[in-house]
Amino acid sequence: MKMLCLAILVLVSSVVAVLSEGCSQGTCKSDETCCATSIPGGYSCCPYENAVCCPGGARCCPQGTVCDVPSGSCRPKMQRQQSKLLNFDDLVKRQGDAVTVSSDDCKPGTCSSDETCCPTAILGDYSCCPYVNAVCCKGHAFCCPEGTECDLVEEKCIFNDEIEESEFEKRQGDLDEESTDKKQCADGSLCSSDNTCCVVAGGKYGCCPHLNGVCCPDKIHCCPQGEKCDVTSHYCVKKEMVHHSSVREQASSVYSEDSA
């Protein structure tokens, strides 16, 4: 029954992860994963590369784990739901002809790029652990995945702590993936340096596409510097134009989770 629940959880997580492909280009950075939120058409950034987007559209987990929604934690795919232990992986002895070297001390071609080179009990000899950035256990016969510790007595890999689910890093607007020139709003949201942070519905922040812009009272629109929002918040009026018949310009929409 536990395995069936885990299989269903993995399937649901995979479906949510597929939805992230609809993210607009540039919304998230290259070392993040774009995940769909609970709002149709809305997306946010998970601070892990190739991450798992959890059901509910509010959380995510690192690659190689599954979302355990009831406990609010991330669990490795290979472990049973109630277990915190992993079996050791025997080192793969490889004479190999791989091109990429995973360790400075490894002989060239010993291990492939998705493995870790670990020393054996024989001085100057190395074998390949089937994990990237793995932990080479004492005794030189076993290895464990990154983020775990070797339990030599039980011959298990023990997780240091439960991996907590990561909350999405809320990000509004189109972000230039190549640019790092960003400003941070009060709630941690990021906007381009030539934008203005504006409070949107729910007390969160969105990005107004004007430098030193004016945030309108409706928490949806904004106006350029030197202008003000009219009573509807839908138009911008030059401050010096006080007559009701003044020419008005359409106010800009603030990028928010609701309008992403």
Image (cartoon, helix red, strand yellow):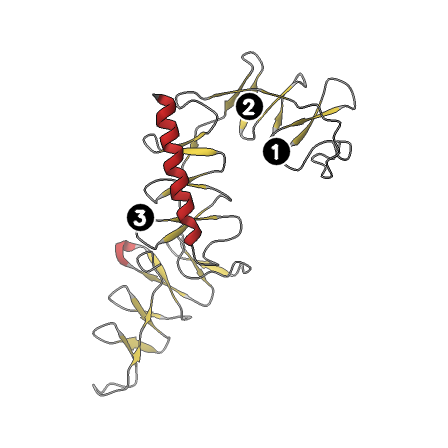
In this view, the residue in front, 27 or 181, is: 27
Using residue 211 as the reference point, say whether residue 88 is left or right of it: right
Q: Secondary structure at mark 2?
A: strand
Residue marked by disc 2 = 149
Residue bearing mark 3: 38
Mark 3 vs 1, N-terminal side: 3
Q: Residues within 10 Å of mark 2 (few under 14, many from 20)?
A: some
Location of residue 60 (image quadrant): top left
Up-down relation of residue 151 to residue 192 (above or below): above
- Looking at the rendered structure, the secondary structure element under dot 3 is loop
Q: CA distance from mark 1 to mark 2?
A: 13 Å
Pick whichever of labels 2 and 3 is earlier in the sequence. 3
Residue 133 marker: 1
Whether residue 166 can be seen here:
no
Q: CA distance from mark 2 to mark 3?
A: 36 Å
Give the x, y percent position of residue 214.
33, 71
